[in-house]
Image: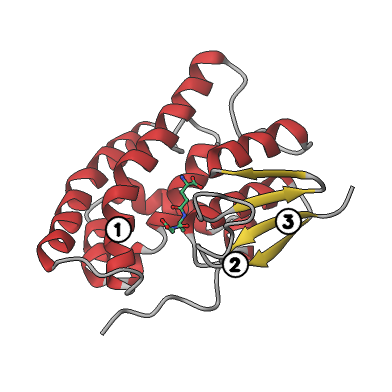
Amino acid sequence: MTKLKIHGMAQSTFTRTVRLACHEKGIDYELVTAMPGEVGAVNPFGKIPVMVQDDFTLYESLAIVRYLDRTFAGPRLWPDEARQAAICDQWISAVCDSLVGSALHYLAARFGFFALPEEMVTRHLERTRALVPIFDRQLGRSRYLAGDHMTAADLFLAPIFLYFPGLPELKSIAEAAPNCTRWARDMGARPSIKATDSEQKPQLAA
Ligand SMILES: N[C@@H](CCC(=O)N[C@@H](CS)C(=O)NCC(=O)O)C(=O)O
């Protein structure tokens, strides 16, 4: 079997989620740098990341992380118990459904990845401000998003949340969420997070 390839960009949050899963499980992989739109041959939706393992190609981060968890040894990224596993899925869905359509769009607009009318940018920021307390309450109940052990859910939240300190308006939202701050500090100490920290940070758009 050839080395697993992850097509994507180090700065992409979804790419980082998949890479974090590889690091947490000790999977040897190669990051093949590709922008969204350059992966049309392997993902008809043109999005990153895409995983290629020999003749097997897979896109959609959740599908990839689940596949990696099922096929490779190393720490499990989902709890075994049915209800706990469902809660992990619930939080993955909640991150993708809520923060991707708010914080991530806000970040993408501020970093100039796409242009949005100013009122929409403001709406994304205000939506982020309203959503973060929900995550903060959950992280006040348990050490990690889906219980007292790190799971795949944390790997979906971390790449988004770890961008917050870089922008003053998101930093203040993070600082008003003490449980998220504690969780981010714990996550930030993990070797997987350190190993996937991109040296090339996106620059704020003028
Ligand atoms: N549902 C996809 C979302 C992936 C995604 O949105 N990736 C971003 C980069 S972080 C992208 O490729 N954006 C380009 C686009 O939306 O056209 C997944 O979970 O992998």
Which residue has dot 3 on it? 5
- Left or right, residue 101 beside residue 14: left
Question: Mark 1 falls on what kind of element?
Answer: helix
Question: Mark 2 falls on what kind of element?
Answer: loop
Q: Amino acid at mark 2?
A: Ala
Lower position in the chain sequence, tag 1 or tag 3: 3
Which residue has dot 2 on it? 34
As measured in the structure, the alpha-carbon distance from the residue carrying label 2 to the one carrying label 3 is 11 Å
As measured in the structure, the alpha-carbon distance from the residue carrying label 1 to the one carrying label 2 is 20 Å
Instruction: Report the residue at 59% width, 55% height from top.
Output: 190
Q: Nearer the viewer, residue 143 or 164?
A: 164
Whole-percent x, y for residue 2 in the image: 87, 53
Lower position in the chain sequence, tag 1 or tag 2: 2
Q: Mark 1: few, some, or many residues within 10 Å (few <14, many ≥20)?
A: many
- Left or right, residue 15 beside residue 31: left
Which residue has dot 1 on it? 105
Whole-percent x, y for residue 7 in the image: 64, 59
